[in-house]
Amino acid sequence: MNSLAPGIDEVRARTSPFPQRHFLSVADLDPVQVGALLDLADDFVSLNRQMSKKHDLLKGRTLINLFFEASTRTQSSFELAGKRLGADVVNMSPRASSIVKGETLVDTAVTLNAMRPDILIIRHGASGAASLLSQKVDCSVVNAGDGQHEHPTQALLDALSMRRAFGRIGGLTVAICGDILHSRVARSNVALLTMLGAHVRLVGPPTLMPAGVERWGVEVHTDMKRGIAGADVVMMLRLQLERMQGALAPSTREYFRLWGLDREKFALTREGARVMHPGPMNRGVEIDSDLADDLSISLIQDQVEMGVAVRMAVLASMAARLDNH
Amino acid sequence: MTAARPLAFLGARLVDPETGYDGPGALVIANGKIAEVWRGDAAPELGADALRVEAAGAMLCPGLIDLRVKTGEPGAEPKETLKSAARAAAAGGVTSIVVQPDTDPVIDDPAVADFILRRARDIELVHVYPAGAATKGLDGHALAEIGLLREAGCVYVTNGDRPIVDSRVMRRLLSYAGGLGVLVAHRPSDPWLADGAVATEGEFSGRLGLASEPVAGEAIMLERDLALVALTGARLMVDQISAAAPLRGLERAKDAGLPVVATASINHLSFNELDIGDYRTFCKLVPPLRSETDRLALIEAVASGLVDIVVSAHAPAPPEDKRLPFEEAAPGAVGLETLLAAMLTLHQEGRVPLARLIETVTLAPARAIGLAAGRLAVGAPADLVLCDIDAPRLIDAAALISKSKNSAFDGRRLQGSVLMTLVEGRIVHDALGATR
């Protein structure tokens, strides 16, 4: 297999500059650019499976991971992606430092910007935070999740996982299930999957659907069984447990009965269907462990692996663009 | 001082909301009052000492009366002082402002009202009237000293941006204030439906991932308030109605003869939910910007008189409160300097007749709070604005006089430039240089 894997020089040659200075939203990309990024990410998957994973595409570059919200998966994924490409990576969790001193998001960003990073990767609990930050700094900004708005690299890694499992994305029926209202993963996935020609269904209780969702160009279902019937992919979303205590749904057990994924409901999907989850999972609340751990069905571990590769592709493209300055 | 010499405006376009007159004329001021009003081509005979202003067809109308202005004084002077607000008002053709009680300390004590009135006298620019707090500390529970606040000069009472949730408190407020003849203003908003919301519920806020409130919350609270008006017989000023659904409730109440007046903010007449765009915090307002359908319904209601009064909803916020993620940013926009131009732009777009528009910012608010101003009548206070209604203006927030520059109109093209503003015959703003 290693003999088929591309060498780093080939990958370097195939890396085209990212179309925008910042990556804030799926809407920053068109289908051709998405295809190119996924192809590049495929190469990085192969490279990451070799013993020597370290390359020099980002040599001399500085990345700052600015995570205002706790995150293990995304932060370490970006960190590994940066380090494997040879960049210096600094992790900042401002919750623990300056923010408590009353410094604003913009102040923090401007301060970090003065240290001349090349790429700032930001996660923040407020929708639009990455966009705000991008207007105040002159480095590139990657949105690693802003409130309930977008999480574009998650959508890319989900697309890559699906493309590798099915060989295509166009024509797939993808059911995204659970708390759509509060989910940036759902918003980015709807944007990307509809752009790539997948048929998207949103499934969940009416109290967890955003207003105006019927105009997103998707099917909307409140009945889980109908919503996942015949689907190729069932993407479960994480549920905030505090939302399940009577505010938006009566209880976790009622939720699991109606919208949790178990074998019985999964049997309604198309033959060969796969399960996805952006993590971290609430086992027994939105998904049965039995399904989540069944590697013939679950793509959840693949998603994590693809996450590093997709982020390497994004960072390498952004660095290629920086070179042009 | 110029007040001593008679001042005459010649060749003006007089717009008088009281008589509905909109035509050529002249006007003479003496001793702080309007001394003569001449319609048509007739010209006054003037003494040699009279100061003449050739208006060259510019509009002369009563100075604007803005019933909803926030300053930062006392308590948050870096945002806006009474002086900076008064200067902004004068530059915008606003001759009377009513300041909101959510200062620090709150205007729930006659001493605070008295402080504001004394400061305004020292500044000597425009009329400043305090609105008193309806409840102590604006807590929504215990009635403030409404009688003493009235004696101290408060022109109405309100709970500001915080709706009074407890219907029993609202009933007692209306009943008590109504009995004293004090106008109550209340912003209709269901606090639970609006909890945490920063935008109007709809496709756009859903895509942006912003917490949102449905318009129904405004309609629900308005219906409660109107039922309590029917119960108590007290006068109510509906503060900043913003959408089509509550307008229908307002119309039913007015048809039934309830003593209700309603205001709308110029922002809700000029912008819709899409103006939030890429999380523009200058367009984060309370109530949030509504749909285009709501905006058009609101303009129609202003034209028909269903909505009586237009306010600037001037709410200064410094960069440290606005340069934040949308959900964390302070709501509100400054508006004193753009109110008239934004109104005139609605007129230029052919949406509302000029005399009616002027009425909503002059005579109608004057009547609501019992002022003698707002008219071009002999003996009325010479609170006037002379304005070139056709002059194009590109709004540059940085060039505003307000200490805070959070204008929702930043970068917008408006029509209408204030040439001169007079308060009791004193020239408080003079872009013509006519008196030099």
Image: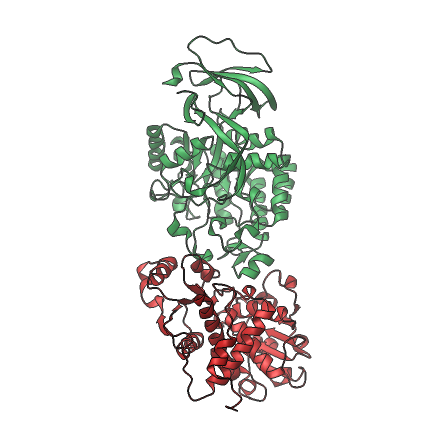
Chain colours: A red, B green
Residue A300 x %, y %: 53, 82
Q: Nearer the viewer, residue A322 or A181?
A: A322
Above/below status of B78 relative to A17: above
Q: Residue at x 46, y 57 (%)?
A: B327
- Quadrant for residue A205, please give it: bottom right
Residue B214 x %, y %: 58, 55
Residue A97 x %, y %: 31, 66
Q: Is residue A239 visible from the viewing direction of this image?
A: no
B6 left or right, relative to A294: left
Q: How many marks?
A: 0
Residue A249 x %, y %: 55, 70
User: Could you tell me which quadrant the C terminus of chain B lies in?
Assistant: top left
Q: Nearer the viewer, residue A229 or A259?
A: A229
Q: Residue at x 56, y 34 (%)?
A: B344
Q: Residue at x 39, y 18 (%)?
A: B2
Above/below status of A231 relative to B135: below
Above/below status of B293 relative to B146: below
Q: Is residue A229 visible from the viewing direction of this image?
A: yes
B94 left or right, relative to B200: left
B325 left or right, relative to A237: left
Q: Residue at x 61, y 78 (%)?
A: A234
- Quadrant for residue B359, please give it: top right
User: Could you tell me which quadrant the N terminus of chain B lies in?
Assistant: top left
Above/below status of A31 relative to B44: below
Q: Nearer the viewer, residue B147 or A233?
A: A233
Q: Nearer the viewer, residue B244 or B319?
A: B319
